Image: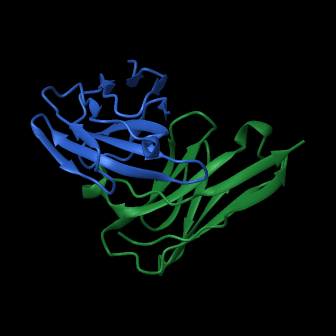
Chain colours: A green, B blue
Amino acid sequence: LAKTTQPISMDSYEGQEVNITCSHNNIATNDYITWYQQFPSQGPRFIIQGYKTKVTNEVASLFIPADRKSSTLSLPRVSLSDTAVYYCLVGPLSNDYKLSFGAGTTVTVRA
Amino acid sequence: NAGVTQTPKFQVLKTGQSMTLQCAQDMNHEYMSWYRQDPGMGLRLIHYSVGAGITDQGEVPNGYNVSRSTTEDFPLRLLSAAPSQTSVYFCASNTQGGTEAFFGQGTRLTVV
């Protein structure tokens, strides 16, 4: 599985855009990039998944450059309720029963 | 749909005791997995199953047993609890080639 590197923590304020970059230099051809969100005392929750270019849903956008060696999760206009740990996962869909989580990025949103 | 349901939510065990953490899903997913999460860390895979009757070990399987007799249920058994097994345990399910995994609310286990 591709190793991922993401910042340990980020601080932001309500209404700002938060961008979390994940590095995955040894990503394989059949690997997808998936982001999960985890609130305290809860299980992780799927946010978004992509293979290349840009993916957007009602929660976030995922930007993936052509070389796919990194990706950026963008959270528009965050609120206090977006305070959570965000995990970047890289792997093939055929391995989606054994996900590999790093330490994640703790995002703290302040008023 | 309830999704993934874990019971109990909290449990305190004495060293050497055994217990079973329950996990049930109602989404007819083929895949189910157990993870543990220690403070400040990400989730680590304990055991997983790709279908009824099929299980395999993950990253940290020692001290745990699993079985999968039905599609819906995937219990995790602690054979002889140790303080090192104090953790939060999460069960997850997803479908083959599916986009996302669905996680339960977790079981917080303390071994004294």
Vertical relation: A98 (above or below) A40 = below
Please say whether residue A47 is visible from this viewpoint: yes
Task: Locate residue B43 relative to residue B1 in the image: left or right.
Answer: right
Please say whether residue A75 is visible from this viewpoint: no
What is the x, y in percent for residue B40?
Answer: 61, 52
Quarter holding the N terminus of chain A is bottom left
Name which quarter of the figure residue A8 lies in: bottom right
Vertical relation: B88 (above or below) A72 = above
Residue at 73% x, 36% y: name it.
A81
What is the x, y in percent for residue B60?
Answer: 33, 54
Task: Locate residue A57 relative to residue B22 in the image: left or right.
Answer: right
What is the x, y in percent for residue A91?
Answer: 36, 63
* Furthest residue toward left: B53
What is the x, y in percent for residue A75?
Answer: 69, 52
* Along the viewing direction, whichever of B13 and A41 lies nearer the viewer: B13
Name which quarter of the figure residue B7 lies in: top left
Quarter holding the C terminus of chain A is top right
* Along the viewing direction, whichever of A57 and B78 lies nearer the viewer: B78
Residue at 51% x, 60% y: name it.
A102
Total numbered labels:
0
* Along the viewing direction, whichever of B58 and A111 lies nearer the viewer: B58
Vertical relation: A41 (above or below) A23 = above
Task: Locate residue A95 relative to residue A23 in the image: left or right.
Answer: left
